[in-house]
Image: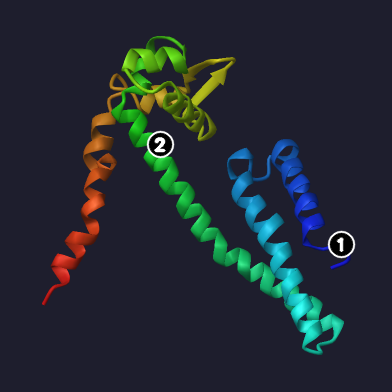
Amino acid sequence: MLFGPLTMSVLGGLVLLFQALLLAHGGLRTLGANAFSMAIADPFAAYWIYNLTIKLGGKEKIAIFLADAIALQSRKELQPFLLGMLGMGVSQVLVTAIRLNVFDALEESPRTADQLATAMDCDRHGMQVLLESLDGFGFLKRQGQQYQLTQDSAQWLTKSGGLINDFLRLGGDISQLANILVVIKACCQP
């Protein structure tokens, strides 16, 4: 309350970055979601509740208690949404990479985004974004400008690993999810 939510957002972001890099609490993959919920949403919610309570004539101790309690609750409400969005993003990136045979193309040797885009007849920028996402989610490793498979990706996500067809058959065919609303509504019609 002393310095306002903007200062807390900067300080909270620095603390979370310190925790992710040096203490391995949460890691870099969750830094964005943690920063939004703990360093942005919490301080602004707490500041707003504190000021509202004071303006309505509440005592400072009650205002601090309410601000803290409601800010913590707002984080609990936001986290499932943020994790759900992250999960959908990871799934979409993974299925796209599998359908483009990115993992199989990297099985022989590490390649750059430009090399893969040329070999697969894809947009260079789109391939760069896909590979950076796969690296960020831990499916690939980047060394300089080249991307290579992780041990798990080589084992589970290549055709020679053997399980890729099962993945696509059992859960990876997300194209059918596009019609889920139509199917649900059709089943619920009287």
Q: State the colouring used for the structure image.
A: rainbow
Q: Quadrant of residue 77?
A: bottom right
The residue drawn where x is 39% and y is 18% is 117
Q: Quadrant of residue 71?
A: bottom right
The residue drawn where x is 25% and y is 51% is 178
Q: Which structural element holds mark 2? A: helix
Q: Which residue is mark 1?
A: 3
Q: Which structural element holds mark 1? A: loop
Left or right of 138? Residue 19 is: right
Image x and y of residue 140, in percent: 48, 25
The residue drawn where x is 75% and y is 37% is 22
Q: Which residue is mark 2?
A: 93
| Residue type, mark 1 in image | Phe
Q: CA distance from mark 2 to mark 1?
A: 40 Å
| Residue type, mark 2 in image | Val
Q: Earlier in the sequence, mark 2 or mark 1?
A: 1
In the image, which is nearer the foreground, mark 2 or mark 1?
A: 1
